[in-house]
Image (cartoon, rainbow, N blue to C red):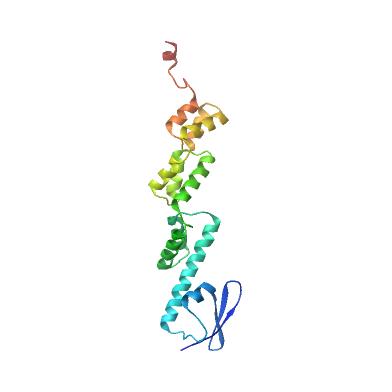
Amino acid sequence: MPVVTALRESRRGRVAVELDGAPWRVLPVEVVVRAGLSEGRLLDRPTLRLLGRELRRARALGVATRALRARDLSVRGLAERLERASVAPAAAAESLAALSRAGILDDERVARNRAQALADRGYGDAAIRHRLQADGLASETAAAALGALAPEAERAGRVIARRGRGPRTARYLAGRGFGEEAVEAALGPGFGQDPEAAIG
């Protein structure tokens, strides 16, 4: 049975492991620590299984942290990324749980930030709700994020002030997911009224 004969620092955060005096593998330091590798330790089946589990766990966390560097993701969004990267389901579940416990994964925060960013870009409630749900956020979480925004009518009013009243602004608002009331407000008072009713 092979024996760990040396552990040497390799690159930053990596350890070169020797078995029976010969180079074997370079492993992340946290894998070496969690697997309990040390000089003189036999590399028996239980140790190899533990080492394999820790390597899968480290890979899952690596994939997850790289994905989260690009943008904040929902739990479901990150789970889908891990699945696409062929991360083992058990390692993915453990990583998602660890990141959630640490507060790194937080669906409420993701929903609030995404909703505010979309509102700032001129989207209405229907479009924001759709985007949040497409990002894997639950309906209740999306609703809470929408509730934290300025009222849709107020946001539509800012668009109308910038673009002016009229059919073009109404179409713009409808295309950006604003509700019927906001669209009607864009058309202005009396727009679309029966001219004869207005005269009589």
Q: Quadrant of residue 21?
A: bottom right
Residue 73 locus on image (x, y percent): 48, 54
Q: Is residue 158 left or right of residue 101?
A: right
Q: Does residue 123 sit above or below 27 in this rendering?
A: above
Could you tell me which residue is drawn at 41 percent across and 44 percent down?
Answer: 144
Q: Is residue 130 left or right of residue 165?
A: left
Could you tell me which residue is drawn at 53 percent across and 54 percent down?
Answer: 71
Q: Does residue 100 sit above or below 41 in this rendering?
A: above
Q: Is residue 17 left or right of residue 76?
A: right
Residue lying furthest top: 200
Residue 195 locus on image (x, y percent): 45, 15
Q: Does residue 16 sit above or below 92 in this rendering?
A: below
Residue 106 locus on image (x, y percent): 45, 54
Residue lying furthest right: 11
Could you tell me which residue is drawn at 44 percent across and 80 percent down?
Answer: 48
Q: Quadrant of residue 16?
A: bottom right
Could you tell me which residue is drawn at 55 percent across and 27 percent down?
Answer: 164
Residue 86 locus on image (x, y percent): 45, 66
Task: Give the position of the C terminus as an image quadrant.
Answer: top left
Q: Does residue 131 sit above or below 51 in this rendering?
A: above
Q: How many marks?
A: 0
